[in-house]
Amino acid sequence: MQALRWAASPLGRFAARHLAVAGVWSFVALAFAVATTSADVAAQPAYSATFVEQTAPSFLEPKTTAPVSITMRNTGTVTWSRDSLDVYLATQEPQDNFYWCIQGNRYLGIEGNRVVLPHDVAPNEEVTFEFLVKPLACRFAAYSPLRFRMLSALHGTFGDETPDPGVVVSTAALFVSQQVPTAVPAGASILATVTYQNTSPFTWEPGDYTLEDMQATGIPVWGVPPVALPASVAPGDSVTFEFYITAPAKAGTYNFQWQMQSAAGAPFGDFSPATSVAVVAGVLPNYQGLWWNAPAESEAGWGINFAHQGDTIFATWFTYDATGKASWVTLTASIVVTGVYSGRLATYTGPPFNSVPFNPLRVKGTPIGTGTLTFTDENTGTFAYTINGVTQTVQTKNIVRQAFGPLPTCSFGVITDLTQAYNYQDLWWAAPAGSESGWGVNLAHQGDTIFATWFTYDLDGTPVWLSATAPKAAAGTYGGTLYRTTGPAFNAVPFLPAAVVRTEVGTATFTFTDGNTGTFAYKIGGVTQSKAITRQVFQAPGTVCQ
């Protein structure tokens, strides 16, 4: 009763009002505190992560292993536990994709799309994931950038997604082309080429890469050590490895396939296509090519070209007449015994080189003597000749092959499809074959250079020859300056090379669409002409040099 009376008194009512106000403020304070705590919780959820840093390669070949490092910070309130198998670093875009094929990180028997925690990570601690990727090794073909995000098996992805480092996944060495004959003589040394394009973002340097024979057995069959990179190769540029293979001594079919290798012995880029090459035994020596006086250069200024097919050599001898004018003589020589060929020497007259059309019926041949070729091996021999006239000339010249580059190996009948040849050393004439019989051009092809001797007719119809050294200008194209030459007469003793004079008269260009088809374009003074040419085959299937 006393308490009730006090509450009803003025003092009691005043105190009640104040207590009520105090209660309101206490409630407001309590509500504010609760709201503040809730805001803090919302700003710092149980699962959150912030990206810190990463390292990744800028370029990577498909199915090649490379290290990646990513550091994340636990900005949530829950410790990430390794043993719980709940929290991982997972690939993104799309989530859990297998494009990068993460190596050595298994969870529940699965590998390729997640990285396991290396240790427990408390709130506000950092963790560095160090792992290996091997793009496209998990058969996931759709492209995905190298991006990751933390993943809880129970709560889903959370926190920052790592930035895309822009890793380029591409073949570092893209195969472009290769040249190797379809058939080669047993034991022969044959020029081959393999071309690759640098599709990586960095320059290849000599000493860093080689080209190596890739056999299924692991045992090289072509007798070639690793082929060194010949020069620096900038991104986007191509490089051609040129090298000589030695064919096995045993006949059979062998694989030709190559791949680049790093200095550490790691495979680098594409394989070249596996190509079958037939090795043929029992191939006879062949003397096709350009020869001159021995020792080499002792009588520079004249020479003799051999087109050797089967048991016959057709020779064109480039020399000088009694007045010193460039002139040519032919020798059709049949085999007498092994290594000896003999036949008739003849000289010709015909329509001038600039005749349109060239009429082969106007070509007239005159026998002038005999000649004999005797070979001691494939690179040395003698040329003995007798030329009848007012005074008979009998001479013998020691001869050797004229080498201005790597000498090719020539063989008759080994390759039957002449279009497959990529060395053009041979006797060529106007196409279609026989359409302008009476003139021709001998091509001595060594490395990236062709030396051409063109036998034709002067404006007065007498025989004349011109020559050109034609370096390779592009694939299948060779060009150079055309020269006319004067020198000592064919029977001069001694023959003095210092008396040989070359005069520039024009240009010559040879363009080939395949091993048996081309054009011979020339400009002499005001005369510009282009002739379709093909190999002159007088005994099928012809001779191919390699």
Image (spheres, rainbow, N blue to C red):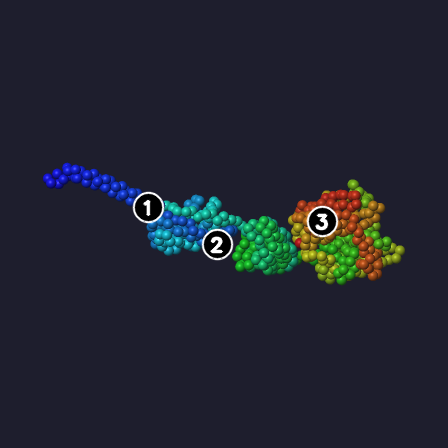
Q: Nearer the viewer, mark 1 or mark 3?
A: 1
Mark 1 lies on a secondary structure that is helix
Which label is found at residue 479?
A: 3
Q: Nearer the viewer, residue 436 or 56?
A: 56
Position of residue 340 relative to residue 534, above or below, is below
Whichever of labels 3 and 2 marks the residue nearer the N terminus, that label is 2
Q: Mark 3: which amino acid?
A: Gly
Q: Which mark is residue 66?
A: 2
- Residue located farthest toward the right when viewing the structure as drawn: 390
Residue at 81% across / 50% down in the picture?
464
Residue 372 on image: x %, y %: 78, 58
Q: Residues within 10 Å of mark 2 (few under 14, many from 20)?
A: some
Residue 187 drawn at (x, y percent)? 64, 59
Residue 41 - label: 1
Snapshot quadrant of residue 13: top left
Give amino acid for label 2: Ala
C-beta proximity under 8 Å, tags 1 and 3: no
Res. 210 image quadrant: bottom right
What kind of element bears circle 3? strand
Of label 1 and label 2, which has the lower sequence position? 1
Mark 3 → mark 2, Cα distance in angstroms: 48 Å
Residue under the image location 52 percent in, 57 percent down: 266
Residue 333 placement (x, y as % from top left): 77, 55
In the foreground, 295 or 414:
295
Residue 355 appears in the rendering = yes
Give the class, few, some or many, for how many residues have Cα within 10 Å of label 1's Cα (few <14, many ≥20).
few
